[in-house]
Image: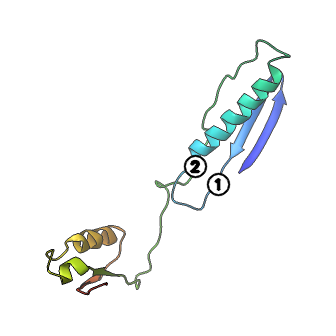
Amino acid sequence: MGFEHKIEDNKIIIEVTVKTIARTGCEMEALFAVSCAALNIYDMLKPIDKDIEIKEIKLIEKKGGKSDFKEEIPEDFKAGVLVISDSVYAGKKKKIKRENLLLRVLEIWGLKKLNIKLSLMNLR
């Protein structure tokens, strides 16, 4: 996180830069940091200037986040799903269909040549 402020004329300009390595944006954290800084400055200066006001808080630039995140999956990458269920083993439930959902999610992520195994074992 980076924080800068400039004093110009009758204004204090606050800028915050936030970076992350995750697939999510962090613009809310940047806006929150600017808001907190502005409120703190407001609180310190209100005894000096009764007309002080916070005028504008806005996002100036956003790069990255989920919309820009492109994760390359190597062509030879392999994945498997192993489902373990003691309920199925004991005969209390039929075969689990969650593996199909897991396969679909992995395919959406770009993984190919998937295989799945249902292991019927007692975990006790």
Q: Amino acid at mark 1?
A: Lys
- Find residue 46 and report its image quarter: top right
The answer to whether residue 35 is above or below residue 84 is above
What residue is drawn where x is 46% and y is 53%?
67
Give the x, y percent position of residue 22: 55, 61
Q: Number of labelled discs?
A: 2
Residue 71 lies left or right of residue 2; in this view the side is left
Q: Residue furthest top?
A: 50
- Residue that appears at 78% across and 41% down: 4
Coordinates of residue 33 in the picture (x, y in percent)? 67, 40
User: Is 95 in front, or is 7?
Assistant: 95
Question: SS at mark 1?
Answer: loop
Quarter location, residue 40 = top right
Front-most of 8 and 96?
96
Q: Residue furthest front?
A: 124
First reached walking from the N terminus: tag 1 or tag 2: 1
Name the residue located 29 percent from the left edge and 71 percent from the top edge.
102
Looking at the rendered structure, which numbered label has been put on residue 60? none
Q: Secondary structure at mark 2?
A: loop
Vertically, is 52 above or below 88? above
Whether the residues at callouts 1 and 2 have beta carbons within 8 Å, the answer is yes
In the rendered view, tell whether residue 59 sits above or below residue 73. Answer: above
Q: Amino acid at mark 2?
A: Cys
Q: Quarter holding the C terminus?
A: bottom left
Marking on residue 19: 1
Residue 81's place in the image compared with 21, above or below, is: below
Q: Is residue 20 left or right of residue 117?
A: right
Residue 69 at x, y percent in the picture = 49, 60
Image mark for residue 26: 2
